[in-house]
Amino acid sequence: MLEVYIDGASAGNPGPSGIGIFIKGEGHQLRFSEYVGIYDNHTTEFIALLRGLEEAQKLSKELISVRSDSQIVVAAVEKRYAKNPVYKDLLDKALEIADTFDFFFIKWVPDNSNLTADQLARKAILNQKDS
């Protein structure tokens, strides 16, 4: 099983935004820290979901468990619905990938259980500001 921890961070709402992805399991421990542009907090969380699934898809087609501290992302995935058109577009793309896995789960986790992804997301913003 792959565990995919995702997080998005924005310095302002909207503001410079970064995503963090931490994938572990099946012999992997991968970290991704990417600056994604100027977005609001929630959009950044959906971008992190999509990117996390894209990276997981490269590693396995079997059991994927995504962990997020964003209640809006977890609820949207569980309901397979987002009213906001921007979120809906990102959610639809993420669900398209999620449906390719044999088993896909998403779980809300508290902030303190998602520290690695959070640090990676914040690092992406800091690195962009330093550029």
Image: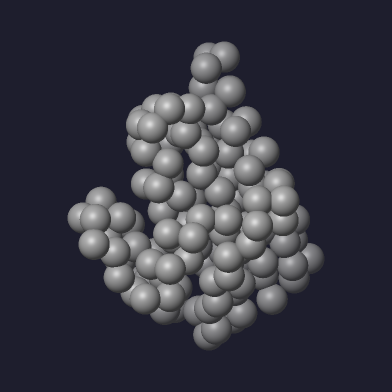
User: Percent from the top left, x then y, of residue 83?
Assistant: 24, 62
| Image quarter hosting the N terminus | bottom right
Q: Nearer the viewer, residue 61 or 92?
A: 92
Judged left or right of residue 25, residue 45 is left
Query: Which residue is situated farthest in the right direction here?
Result: 27
Above or below — where is 38 with respect to 102? above
Quarter where residue 91 is shown? bottom left
Residue appearing at x 36%, y 31% in the figure: 14
Q: Residue at x 47, y 34 (%)?
A: 10
Residue 104 left/right relative to 42: right
Can residue 93 be seen from the camera position used here?
Answer: no
Residue 102, relative to residue 68: is it above or below?
below
Q: What colour scheme does the image use? A: one colour
> Vertically, is 99 above or below 125?
below
Of 67 and 70, nearer the camera is 70
Q: Residue at x 53, y 85 (%)?
A: 102
